[in-house]
Amino acid sequence: MILWAVIALVGMGALAWVFRFAGQSVTGNAPKFRDMPYGVAFGYVLGAAVLLWLVWAYTQGRSSDQAIANKFFFLRIAIEGFIIFAVAAWLFRILGRSLGTAWSKKMFRSMPLTASFGILTIIIYAIFAIFAGAIAPYGQEQIIPGVAANIVPGGDPALGGNPEFYFGTDQIGRDILSRLIYGAQNTVGIAFATTLLAFFIGGTLGFLAATLGGWLDQILSRLVDVLMAIPSLIFALLLMTIASVWAPQLGIPLTVFMVIIIAVIDSTRVYRLARAVGQNIVVMDYIEAAKLRGEGLGYLVFKEILPNATAPLLAEFGLRFCFVFLTIAALSFLGVGIQPPLADWGTMVRDLGGFVNYAQFAPLAATAPLLAAGAIALLTVAVNFVVDWMLHKSSGLKE
Amino acid sequence: MGNVLKIILQRLALGLLTLLIVSMVIFVAVNLLPGDFAQSILGQGATPEAVASIRTDLGLDRPPVTRYFQWLGGVLQGDLGTSFAQANFASFTGTDSGATTVAQQIAPRFANTMFLAMVTAAIAVPFSIILGILAALYRNTVFDRATNIFTLSSISSPEFFLAYILILFLAVLTPIFPSLSNIYEGMAFSERLEKSMLPALTLTLVVTAHMMRMTRAAIINLLASPYIEMARLKGLSPMRVIVKHALPNALAPIINVIALNLAYLITGVVVVEVVFVYPGIGQLFVDSVKIRDIPVVQACCLIFATAFILLNLTADIMSILSNPRLRHPK
């Protein structure tokens, strides 16, 4: 194993030298090849080797020998998925460049592929989340009678699938496809509501602290300092323990407690930003003028400060949403988040996670937990791509 | 130098104060529970007499302020209380397993978690700094973009997704590392390292992005300065310019980010330990949360918070120390 790695490295090292030498002699010592450091040449060869290996692995994944095809099944799916997403993002960008208003056309023209992929993904998720009830073939809690647990996706009876349930059925006979679609509604919806609540609490308090200053500012800021000194997931777990005792006594679902707990923990981060942005706005002349006009506090916060603070808060909203979404997914995965029977991706990963270990013999069976985990990852990656692009654009970084 | 010492002492005092307040927050949060510990130990069918006797036993009949100081005093002496689950178990079987106090339960697991964190740091820190330097050196090339997309995707994926992907490719399809980290005492170092490799790699993927991006940004930020121009005009190779001239001046923000990410590791470790069944403190924490073993939850929370605050403090002090303007005041 190690011997092979060494042989491959030495071989590539020699190839890199040959590559540079060949480039120099063929192009008649063009500057690109003449000044190329050895490391760069090695990098080119390494990149080419990886690409070649991927192509080889892809053909292996399509091999007629089932054992070999199984081994490369996931790589094949990953490569196909990558290409499909890239093409979809590219087509979407072309569509965006030719349709819509002048403003949106201009936006799409300067957009990198990653960002258009992000926007496309977010739109698809939003559609699934809003119309989950209409799209899903079965109910999220519906246990289909007379159906054995069968997590093989694809619906191909020859491979052991059930054509009626495209992604199979889980341990107690619920349709996995429907639960994935409802998961979009529950997981994303709850995360969105939590983020909104966090922004409402953090934003309001932050602006109030910036406008009023004095002891209110001091008390709130020190309180936020203390809350931020405890790692958020740990603090959330501690509070969820306590909430899980309270919830049955008060008759309130645990999920409601979770929303409030995460919103409060995350509002501390929003508070910091809102206060900083607010303090920059409060010293402006138009605020002074509004104060002299005798406007009340509510008018100052909502009519003067808020409209001028939307841009930084929006970018923060995207990032916060990712954090909240991942925290909720982690809590659900640990078994203390969104409670059954609500369909939720984190819980699905936990319930089906063990099937990953059968991947070598039954790759289809291992896809079920990866689908749910992948659904979470895809959305956060998409949001991060969009936020990254927005930040890059607004910071004017050109280098 | 006196100036720096004063600032550092101030930060230390502030850190201690924060820790004290955090311990209060944890104590108050736990004491918000309806009913009390005695009731939870004995369960629903307990007679009032039994509850009362346990209350006196655990000191729950005293006022909260007294209890807080007793708890705090105990913590300072290394006594974190008695685990409900262990206490129950011992009284039920009549045997004393020897590990009934929280401290005894936590100590070996804490060592395991520290081991995992150190392995992760040993992989992640050099990896991300080298990646960051290379990305800065070949900025705006295919390599730079690919690294950017890769790290951004890995930081935004949930930890368990990365963990399952690694299990799938490195443990199931090509069995290089074991997918379960069943670590026990007295294990050989190499075997221990092999078993904790997958969790360490997962955590590496989680923390690399931030460190790598900071390294890249800090170096690129410096590349416009006159002394870099000078070094370039002298005819130094781009690699040498970056490693010898840019990197030392970019170290302050990089060290800061490394310390912050090590602090982040502490949160990430919980999920990763659960996926790989790694016997660390994170898993103990989650298990205790599920069975509502309050003393253990309280103790774990305090340990996590302490580590978090200490690492943040280190980040603070390091960035002060690496700033020559503060070290050599005029």
Image (cartoon, rainbow, N blue to C red):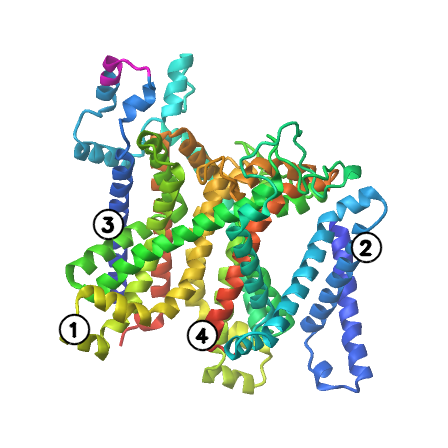
On screen, residue B270 versus residue B143, left or right, reads left
Residue B74, above or below A75: above
Asked whether B49 falls inside the magenta stretch, the response is yes
Q: Earlier in the sequence, mark 2 or mark 4?
A: 2
Where residue A59 is drawn, which disc sits there?
A: 2
Q: Main secondary structure of the magenta part?
A: helix
In front of the other: B107 or A234: A234
Residue B91, above or below A120: above
The residue carrying mark 1 is: A291
Where residue B12 is drawn, which disc sits there?
A: none
**Structural distance between the alpha carbons of marks 2 and 4:** 43 Å
**Structural distance between the alpha carbons of marks 2 and 3:** 62 Å
Residue type pointed to by label 3? Leu
On screen, residue A34 versus residue A342, left or right, reads right
Residue type pointed to by label 1? Lys
Neighbourhood count class around disc 4 (C-alpha, 10 Å): few under 14, some 14–19, many 20 upward: few
- The answer to the question of whether label 2 and label 3 lie on touching residues, with beta carbons closer than 8 A, is no
Q: Chain of mark 2?
A: A
In front of the other: B120 or A190: A190
The residue carrying mark 4 is: A394
The residue carrying mark 3 is: B17
The region drawn magenta spans B45-52
Residue B225, above or below A241: below
Viewer-nearest of labels 2 and 3? 2
Q: Chain of mark 1?
A: A
